[in-house]
Image (cartoon, grey):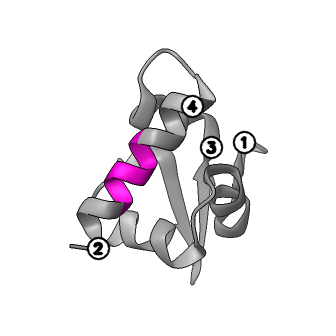
Amino acid sequence: MSNKFVPVDAVADRFGMSVHTVRGWVKRGLVPDDLYMKIGNTYRYDIAGLEGHFLGPKNQKKKLRKKLRILFLILTL
């Protein structure tokens, strides 16, 4: 396993979301298959890949946080 794949709590901390929200992204199909892997009951995520997927080529923290908040609001409607 590559070092770039981290546990769900690291992803939640990085994006300022709950672990439940991150797991919901996978359940709803919002995270491409190549950005996470499942080993037994454990998921590992590619944080850099998630930033690129949700933000695009520019990795600006403000834009990322805004997009993730909008995504969170949409998912909770």
Query: Viewer-nearest of labels 2 and 3?
Result: 2
Q: Name the kind of residue labelled 4 in the image.
A: Lys
Q: CA distance from mark 2 to mark 1?
A: 29 Å
User: Disc 4, disc 1: CB below 8 Å?
Assistant: no
Residue closest to the eye, 30 or 66: 66
Q: CA distance from mark 1 to mark 3?
A: 7 Å
Q: Position of residue 28 (x, y in %)?
A: 26, 67
Q: Name the kind of residue labelled 2 in the image.
A: Thr
Res 47 seen here: yes
At x 40%, y 41%, the residue is 67
Q: Earlier in the sequence, mark 4 or mark 3?
A: 3
Residue closest to the eye, 2 or 77: 77
Specify few, some or many for label 3: CA neighbours under 10 Å numbering under 14, 14-19, or 20 or more. many
Label 4: element kind: helix
Q: Earlier in the sequence, mark 1 or mark 3?
A: 1
Query: Viewer-nearest of labels 4 and 1?
Result: 4
Label 3: element kind: helix
- In this view, 19 is above or below 16: below
At x 44%, y 48%, the residue is 68
Residue 55's quadrant in the figure? top left
> What are the residue bounds of the magenta stretch?
67-72
The quarter in which the C terminus is drawn is: bottom left
Q: Which residue is mark 4?
A: 62
Q: Which residue is mark 1?
A: 4
